[in-house]
Amino acid sequence: MIMTELEILFEDEHYIAVNKPAGVMVHRSSIAKDDNPVYAMQVLRDQMGHHVYPLHRIDRPTSGVLWFARNRDVVPVFQEQFITKDIQKYYLTAVRGYTKEHEGLIDYPLRKNLKKELQDAQTAYLRLGQVEIPIQSSPRHDTSRYSLVRASPLTGRMHQIRRHFAHERNYIIGDNTHGDNRQNRFFRMHFQMHHMLLHAWFTVFDHPITGEKITVTAPLPDHFYKIITEFGWKELV
C-alpha cells in the first residue's frame, strides 16, 4: 500500500482528526509482518510538515476517525477525557445474525492476553437494521441473516468490540482474528469483500482547550458502503 495523504476530518491549532483507511497502522509496531506497512502517524507528519502525536489507537483492519495532537502539551488533557469517558466513540459494524436485543449492553470481562487478569469491559450497542438474504452461507440454514449495529465501547480493551460481538456469536464480518471464517469466505465469494466491516464512525466531546462541542464523522469506506447498499441499509446511515 502506498499513501501520501490522509483525509483530514478536523483541524485546529491543537488537534487533528483523520479518516484512517483499513490496513493502515497508527504508528510503528513490532506486530507488522509485511515488508512495507503504512503508518498513519508518519503519513500525517509528512503531510502536515511537523510532528504529530497519536491520542489513541484503532485496530489496523478498522477504518475511521483517528485523533492526533499537534504538540505534546495538549496530549494529557485530551487523553484524560478518554479515561473519564467524556469522549463518546461510536463505531459502525455489520455482524452475523440478529442481535439479541434492539439496544443492549455487552458486559463481559476480557484479558489482554492469557497471562493477564480479567479486566472489566462494556460495549453498548444499538441495532440500526437487519436483513435476511435468500443465499445460504451455512449448511444449517437456507437463508442468511445480518445486523447493522452502532457500537460504543465504554472501556478501552484490546479488540474489545470484535471480541464482545464474538462472545455474543454475532461475529463481525471480515474479522479474521475473532470472526467466523465461513462467513468471511462467503463475503469474499459473493460480494468480493476482503475487509473487516468495522468503522470508527464518529466521536462527540467537549474540546479540552476551547470547551466547544465537537462532533467529527468519518465517511464510510467504499467496501462498507457497498455492503450497506447491497443490504438496503443506505437510509439508516
Image (tube, rainbow, N blue to C red):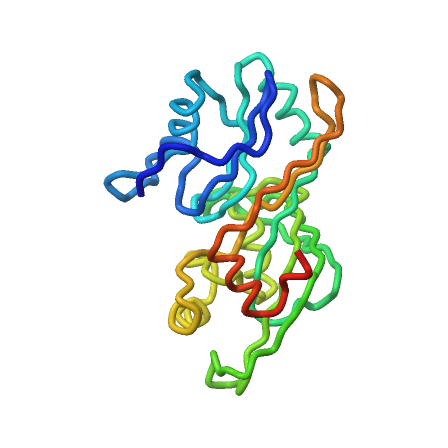
- Image position of 71 (left or right of 36): right
Residue most toward the top?
A: 73
Q: Decide: is 158 above or below 169.
A: above
- Image position of 82 (left or right of 113): right
Could you tell me residue 53's position as x and y percent?
49, 22
- Image position of 134 (left or right of 196): right
Q: Name the one closer to the observer, 231 or 104.
A: 231
Q: Decide: is 109 above or below 144.
A: above
Quadrant placement of the C terminus: bottom right
- Image position of 162 (left or right of 154): left
Could you tell me residue 26's position as x and y percent?
44, 34
Q: Quadrant of residue 181?
A: bottom left
Could you tell me residue 36's position as x and y percent?
26, 38
Q: Quadrant of residue 82?
A: top right
Tell me which residue sits at (49%, 47%) in the image. 62
Tell me which residue sits at (42%, 73%) in the image. 190
Could you tell me residue 120's position as x and y percent?
64, 44
Q: Name the one closer to the observer, 219 or 51.
A: 219
Q: Name the one closer to the observer, 166 or 108.
A: 166
Tell me which residue sits at (49%, 36%) in the image. 7
Q: Quadrant of residue 134?
A: bottom right
Count of numbered circles in the view: 0
Tell me which residue sits at (43%, 16%) in the image. 50
Quadrant placement of the N terminus: top left
